[in-house]
Image: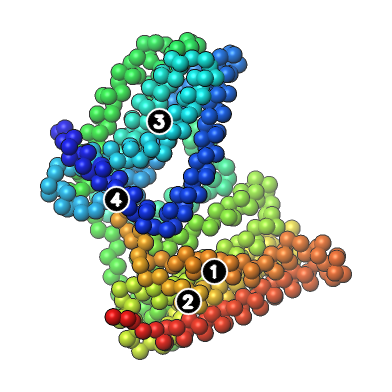
């Protein structure tokens, strides 16, 4: 069924308007957009310079196999939007606001066409200027206006096929997740496995081992013919018949991929979805199952708060996705360790810092606001501020302390650091997350946030405020500096003051724990007092 263009246009414009309103009303997204704009200027300069240099090389005959490079380029231009749009469709485009109302007023083909049009306009708005700069510079460098027309036609055709193909792939994966009991039940674990695998490829610099075969397979397919189309005005061994065939087949491929994506979208939107974990668990003591047994020896109020925090994280892990972002800080040292076959001195202190930051940010950086709609119920229960904050500390530090300590000690011992320094870092790695959790509790109580933030298209949650993030990160960094100095510069600093390097390392770790512990104690007391004295205004 052909979509109604008027309906599709209205859906597309409404979708774009919603995206802009969502961005405009989010301070964090506006700041990220401003930062991205600065990098965009760098990309624009690189596209212009690269296009001009490539054009000059083509005109001078300095490229040995220009057609091979052109076909690789065609493969890359197709594959990139396929991955981008497939991921975005899987993450957000498949879930639309007021979906039930839309599907009862217009055919699902119209809705799919509108969403696809909005996504194409979004991508073209971002990549269009870069594409025009690169194509224009290529034509100037080669001295051929016809080259600009043929390259632009090839690129736009590939982008159109890439966007609609990615849309179909995204809905195919969504339909699989929706209909598979196994995938629905284990989608969190599967998503984590995919992320870990991706990070492993990045860290080991083996991502090209996956991408290269894909590009090679696409290059030798008819997609490579668009390389012939791009270079057609220059000759260079191109096949005009293949170039014309590629351009003529584009509308058929786009129409076929759209028909497939609309069919898959209908299967997803109208189909029965497999049920994942219901969230209902059997009661056992103070909690549920193994989660409850982990806190059975604690006072009942503290155990219940800790259990509640863990169960929330298990049922909605996406709420804690922000904890993963700073993990990229340690990607460099881990990659260096894998390539060099030895652990660099920078890795253990950075693991201690990240583990402490993640521990504090996960459960205690918004102790009051994180209760959300159940805050009135929480405040009217007999639980005291001390029990409540203790429960949050157990939830965070009970996991973060041991894990961070073991990882820090293990990597420190595996490096060439002295044993005394490694042990000192291990102790700091175990103790700093405990202090960080207490530190975050007070800072989060001083800067609570009750409003929800958009995590994905269809998911919102209450996240810590930006002020809490900034204050906590700064305070933790200041406390971490002595331990870092003790690890990074123990030997030169020890020689300058006339003491053994081990003394510097142990002293730095001790000073870090002392500073973090003192700050955590006052912060903990403030959080307890804030909870006990908190009043709702109605």
Instruction: Choose the circle earlier in sequence order: 3 or 2.
Output: 3
Give the side of residue 496 with respect to residue 179, left or right: right
Instruction: Choose the circle earlier in sequence order: 2 or 1.
Output: 2
Q: CA distance from mark 2 to mark 1?
A: 10 Å
The residue tagged 3 is: 78
Could one spot residue 460 in this view of the protein? yes
Instruction: Choose the circle earlier in sequence order: 1 or 3.
Output: 3
Instruction: Choose the circle earlier in sequence order: 2 or 4.
Output: 4
What secondary structure is found at the residue carrying circle 1?
A: helix
| Looking at the image, residue 218 lies above or below residue 239 | below
Q: Residues within 10 Å of mark 2 (few under 14, many from 20)?
A: some
Q: Are marks 2 and 1 in contact (CB under 8 Å)?
A: yes
Quadrant position of residue 297? bottom left
Q: Residues within 10 Å of mark 1 (few under 14, many from 20)?
A: some
The residue tagged 4 is: 18
Q: Nearer the viewer, residue 335 or 485?
A: 485
Q: Are marks 3 and 2 in contact (CB under 8 Å)?
A: no
| Looking at the image, residue 10 lies above or below residue 524 | above
| Looking at the image, residue 317 lies above or below residue 436 | above
Please give the count of numbered marks on the rendered protein. Answer: 4
């Amino acid at each position: 069924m052909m979509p109604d263009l008027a309906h599709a246009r209205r859906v597309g414009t409404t979708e774009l308007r919603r995206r802009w309103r969502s961005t405009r009303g989010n301070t964090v997204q506006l700041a990220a957009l401003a930062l991205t704009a600065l990098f965009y200027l760098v990309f624009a300069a690189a596209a212009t310079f690269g296009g001009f240099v490539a054009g000059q090389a083509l005109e001078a005959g300095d490229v040995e196999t220009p057609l091979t490079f052109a076909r690789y380029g065609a493969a890359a231009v197709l594959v990139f939007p396929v991955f981008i749009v497939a991921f975005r469709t899987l993450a957000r485009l498949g879930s639309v606001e007021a979906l039930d109302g839309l599907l009862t007023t217009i055919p699902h083909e119209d809705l799919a066409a509108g969403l696809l049009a909005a996504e194409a306009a979004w991508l073209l708005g971002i990549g269009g200027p870069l594409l025009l700069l690169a194509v224009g510079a290529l034509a100037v460098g080669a001295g051929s206006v016809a080259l600009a027309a043929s390259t632009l036609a090839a690129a736009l055709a590939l982008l159109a096929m890439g966007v609609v193909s990615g849309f179909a792939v995204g809905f195919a994966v969504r339909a699989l997740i929706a209909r598979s009991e196994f995938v629905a039940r284990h989608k969190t674990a599967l998503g984590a496995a995919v992320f870990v695998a991706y990070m492993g490829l990045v860290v080991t610099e083996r991502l090209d081992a996956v991408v290269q075969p894909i590009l090679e397979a696409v290059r030798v397919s008819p997609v490579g013919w668009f390389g012939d189309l791009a270079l057609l005005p220059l000759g260079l061994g191109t096949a005009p018949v293949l170039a014309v065939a590629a351009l003529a087949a584009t509308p058929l491929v786009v129409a076929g991929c759209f028909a497939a994506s609309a069919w898959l979208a209908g299967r997803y939107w109208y189909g029965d979805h497999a049920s994942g974990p219901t969230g209902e668990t059997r009661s056992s003591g103070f909690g549920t199952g193994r989660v409850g047994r982990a806190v059975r020896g604690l006072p009942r109020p503290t155990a219940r708060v800790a259990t509640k925090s863990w169960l929330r994280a298990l049922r909605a892990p996406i709420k804690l996705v922000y904890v993963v972002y700073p993990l990229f800080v340690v990607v460099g040292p881990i990659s260096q360790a894998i390539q060099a076959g030895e652990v660099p001195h920078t890795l253990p202190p950075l693991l201690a810092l990240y583990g402490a930051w993640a521990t504090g940010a996960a459960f205690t950086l918004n102790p009051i606001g994180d209760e959300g709609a159940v805050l009135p119920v929480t405040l009217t229960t007999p639980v005291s501020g001390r029990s409540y904050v203790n429960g949050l500390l157990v939830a965070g530090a009970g996991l973060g302390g041991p894990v961070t300590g073991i990882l820090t000690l293990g990597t420190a011992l595996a490096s060439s650091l002295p044993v005394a320094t490694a042990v000192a870092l291990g102790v700091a790695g175990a103790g700093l997350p405990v202090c960080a959790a207490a530190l975050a509790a007070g800072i989060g109580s001083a800067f609570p946030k009750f409003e929800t933030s958009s995590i994905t298209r269809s998911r919102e949650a209450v996240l810590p405020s930006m002020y809490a993030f900034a204050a906590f990160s700064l305070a933790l960094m200041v406390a971490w500096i002595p331990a870092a100095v003790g690890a990074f510069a123990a030997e030169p600093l020890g020689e300058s003051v006339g003491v053994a390097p081990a003394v510097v390392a142990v002293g730095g770790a001790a000073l870090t724990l002392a500073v973090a512990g003192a700050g955590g104690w006052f912060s903990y007391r403030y959080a307890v007092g804030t909870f006990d004295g908190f009043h709702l205004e109605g």
